[in-house]
Image (cartoon, rainbow, N blue to C red):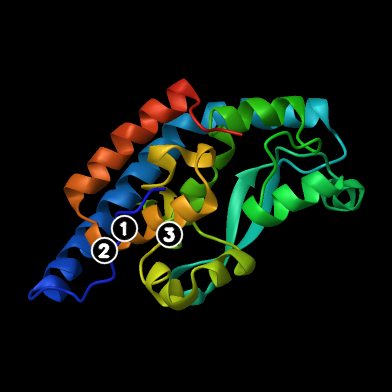
Amino acid sequence: MFSIYKDKAPAIGTVQKAAGYEACKRWIDVSVALCALFLLSPFFALIALCIKLEDPAGKVFYVHNRIGYRGKKLGLYKFRSMVYNAEDMIQSFTPEQRKEFQENFKLENDPRITRVGKFLRATSLDELPQLLNILKGELSLVGPRPVVKAELEKYGRHRDKLVSVLPGLTGYWQANGRSATTYGERMEMELYYVDNRSFALDMKILLKTAGAVLSREGAY
């Protein structure tokens, strides 16, 4: 069991340092997101074409409602990776699938995912539209992954701590196993990041995320 998170009070000077860190981090977020959107725009078009060719009935993009910074509603942009009637198919889940979905908020072998969607998820390309969330100031490059309301409840007395920072396109959890970890381990990792965030940790997370994406570690 991953257990490095310890509840602790802010150190002297933490608030002042955090203000400078957050301002600089925001500048980096916007700069990287703008450059990435410009360079990847042809790739966006190719992905959109593949999605429509396989499942013409559905939309290219999907907006998933999550809980964002300070508990505000966040519409998270994604390339659609499931069939257009994915929500209706939940009713046909087996008891085992329902149990897995309730515990982890996802399925390892989800029958609703399309062939293109499996590739997008394995490579994390379905997350690329979240560069727009970054430009809107709703996400950072690095931070705890945004959660749905039911997930936030699992954090108990640490709920406010989790949403006290901008959620991220990637984070400590995604760089250290992603879906290969239990949900309890994920919570420990996300809270650890909130208490220990820094430029050095952010850079380490970005590098480890790149490695995890290339190896498809813990992706589904």
Q: What element carries label 1?
A: helix
Q: Residue 83 versus residue 179: which sits nearer the camera?
A: 179
Q: Distance between the residues labelled 1 and 2?
A: 5 Å
Mark number for residue 195? 2
Badge 3: few (under 14), some or many (20 or more) residues near its Cα, within 10 Å?
many
Residue found 44% across the figure and 42% down from its top: 174
Residue found 18% across the figure and 74% down from its top: 10
- What amino acid type should be assigned to the residue bearing mark 2? Asp
Residue 67: tell me if it is visible: yes
Residue 203 in percent (x, y) is at: 24, 41
Residue 23 in percent (x, y) is at: 22, 63
Provide the residue designation for mark 3. Answer: 167
Q: Do the residues labelled 3 and 2 touch (CB within 8 Å)?
A: no
Name which of mark 1 and mark 3 comes first in the sequence: 3
Q: What element carries label 3?
A: loop
Residue found 48% across the figure and 31% down from its top: 40
Q: Residue 188 versus residue 19: which sits nearer the camera?
A: 188
- What amino acid type should be assigned to the residue bearing mark 3? Pro
Provide the residue designation for mark 1. Answer: 192
Residue 128: tell me if it is visible: no
Badge 1: few (under 14), some or many (20 or more) residues near its Cα, within 10 Å?
many
Q: In this view, does 131 lie above or below 167?
A: above
Q: In which quarter of the image is residue 66?
A: bottom right
